[in-house]
């Protein structure tokens, strides 16, 4: 019999795992270029899920395959490259805070393209979310030293978060009839196949020759990012949605930015008033969008 606190434990666990993803990207960038970090993340996640793809291969028709590929491209492929590139421009903590706006963009795109109703409190949530993003990015825009905080990196992270919001609606509207394992495995499998030639074209042998042990260390962190942070956690999340509700499962959105900011402090990333204020504004936005 499942303990009543078990779903809460899973939510916290997912928040810790996904909140740590941004510092793992940072560790991967020590020896690899952003395009390599993204490709490796997708390869580790997708090839790990290939046994699941093989197991369920006869249960997916051609129509669903198109949306599974689109889900992989929008929800995994492009965001992986955007967040990896952003990791070179902004602190990992800011990436984590901006990622927390996913429910906001899910609501907006659901309203624009799928007829989801927006209530008055949702509009206020959008306002506070945009205000939080502005507080995070505008100080960096006026900084003379872009090595500290390049606002372009923040914009890339926001675009990635917008794509997450679109992907949630695609899954809900076009793939909800499929087994959660299929919705998790097939998109990652598609992206792993696409990422492999991209990675090979970057001459990875030169990274290992130039960085030696550091490259192997970064590879290990990216393996954790792909297998645990992308593949296993996605399966656990989809199972949690089945056993509880999507709203309850999504409460890990409150934990992710706190974990990412905490890791940033551990690695002595820049921490200013704008990060704290932006985090608070984003929390208000998430609460307004997600509360019943």
Image (tube, helix red, strand yellow):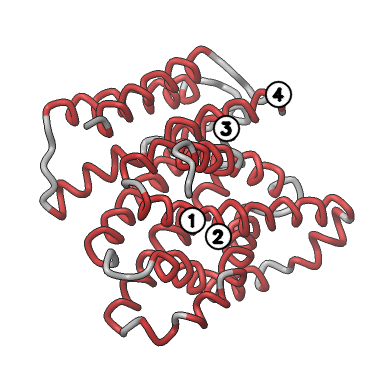
* Eye-nearest disc, 3 or 4: 3
Label 1 and label 4: CA atoms lie apart by: 29 Å
Label 2 and label 1: CA atoms lie apart by: 5 Å
Q: Are marks 3 and 4 in contact (CB under 8 Å)?
A: no
Q: Which residue is at the front of the view, 5 or 118?
A: 5
* Eye-nearest disc, 3 or 1: 1
Q: Which mark is residue 260?
A: 3
- Residue 4, image x and y in percent? 44, 38
> In terms of image quadrants, where is residue 242?
bottom left
Label 3 and label 1: CA atoms lie apart by: 18 Å
* Eye-nearest disc, 2 or 4: 2
Label 1 vs 4, first from the N-terminus: 1
Q: Which residue is at the front of the view, 141 or 27?
A: 27
Q: Are marks 2 and 1 in contact (CB under 8 Å)?
A: yes
> Relative to residue 9, is residue 142 depicted above or below?
above
Q: Which residue is at the front of the view, 134 or 129?
A: 129
| Left-right relation of 221 to 240 | right
Q: Are marks 1 and 4 in contact (CB under 8 Å)?
A: no
> In terms of image quadrants, where is residue 180?
bottom left
Label 2 vs 4, first from the N-terminus: 2
Residue behind mark 4: 268
> Relative to residue 185, is residue 107 depicted above or below?
above
Packing grade of label 3 (10 A; few <14, some 14-19, many >=20) is many
Label 3 SS: helix
Q: Which mark is residue 231?
A: 2
Residue behind mark 1: 234
> Relative to residue 31, is residue 279 depicted above or below?
above
* Eye-nearest disc, 1 or 4: 1
Q: Residue at 20% across / 24% down in the picture? A: 124
């Amino acid at each position: 019999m499942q303990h009543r606190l078990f779903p809460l434990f899973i939510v916290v666990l997912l928040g810790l795992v996904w909140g740590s993803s941004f510092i793992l990207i940072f560790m991967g960038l020590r020896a690899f270029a952003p395009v390599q970090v993204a490709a490796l993340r997708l390869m580790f996640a997708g090839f790990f899920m290939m046994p699941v793809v093989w197991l369920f291969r006869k249960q997916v028709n051609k129509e669903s395959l198109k949306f599974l590929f689109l889900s992989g491209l929008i929800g995994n492929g492009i965001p992986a490259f955007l967040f990896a590139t952003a990791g070179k421009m902004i602190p990992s903590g800011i990436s984590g805070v901006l990622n927390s706006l996913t429910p906001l963009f899910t609501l907006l795109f659901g309203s624009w393209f799928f007829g989801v109703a927006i209530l008055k409190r949702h509009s206020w949530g959008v306002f506070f979310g945009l205000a939080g993003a502005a507080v995070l990015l505008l100080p960096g825009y006026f900084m003379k030293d872009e090595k500290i905080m390049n606002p372009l990196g923040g914009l890339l992270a926001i675009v990635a978060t917008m794509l997450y919001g679109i992907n949630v609606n695609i899954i809900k509207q076009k793939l909800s009839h499929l087994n959660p394992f299929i919705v998790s495995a097939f998109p990652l499998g598609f992206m792993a196949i696409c990422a492999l030639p991209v990675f090979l074209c970057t001459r990875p042998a030169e990274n290992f020759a130039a960085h030696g042990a550091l490259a192997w260390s970064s590879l290990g962190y990216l393996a954790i990012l792909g297998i645990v942070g992308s593949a296993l956690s996605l399966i656990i999340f989809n199972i949690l949605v089945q056993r509880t509700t999507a709203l309850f499962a999504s409460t890990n959105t409150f934990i992710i930015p706190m974990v990412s900011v905490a890791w940033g402090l551990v690695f002595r990333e820049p921490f200013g008033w704008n990060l704290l204020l932006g985090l608070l504004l984003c929390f208000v936005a998430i609460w307004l969008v997600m509360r019943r």
